[in-house]
Amino acid sequence: MPSGLTLGFTNVVMWADSSEACRHKLENYLARYKWKLLSVDRVELIDSEIDRGDEINRLMDEALQNPNAILLSTFHGYKPD
């Protein structure tokens, strides 16, 4: 990235039928931008009854309208130590 930040994290909302499918779809998506997925902290089923904050709630609503979407929240970048 132009800023020199080489690591980062974000929340992702997408449809997948397993953790493995989620990881595979995300790796392919990120590869289009020459980014590499280093790890996945956790994969959760969305419970629409739980308020996850404005940004994630909006992404969940968008995913309901487009099951093919891969939606990323705010990206937080940093430099390694």
Image (cartoon, rainbow, N blue to C red):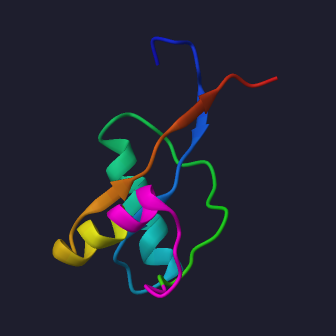
Q: Position of 22 compared to 69: left or right? A: right
Query: x and y percent of residue 75 in the render?
Result: 49, 39
Residue at image point 38% right, 46% down: 30
Q: Is residue 44 above or below residue 12?
A: below
Q: Position of 30 compared to 8: left or right? A: left
Q: Which residues are magenta?
A: 47-58
| Residue 81 belongs to the span the image colors magenta | no
| Residue 50 belongs to the span the image colors magenta | yes
Q: Position of 58 compared to 10: left or right? A: left
Q: Position of 48 compared to 29: left or right? A: right
Query: x and y percent of residue 42 in the render?
Result: 64, 70
Q: Is residue 2 above or below residue 57?
A: above
Residue at image point 28% right, 71% down: 61
Query: x and y percent of residue 36 in the render?
Result: 50, 42
Q: Residue furthest left?
A: 65
Residue at image point 34% right, 77% down: 15
Name the foreground residue: 54 vs 79: 54
Name the foreground residue: 36 vs 56: 56
Image quadrant holding the C terminus, namely top right
Answer with the quarter of the image where residue 5 lies.
top right
Residue at image point 61% right, 48% down: 38
Q: Is residue 7 above or below residue 38?
A: above
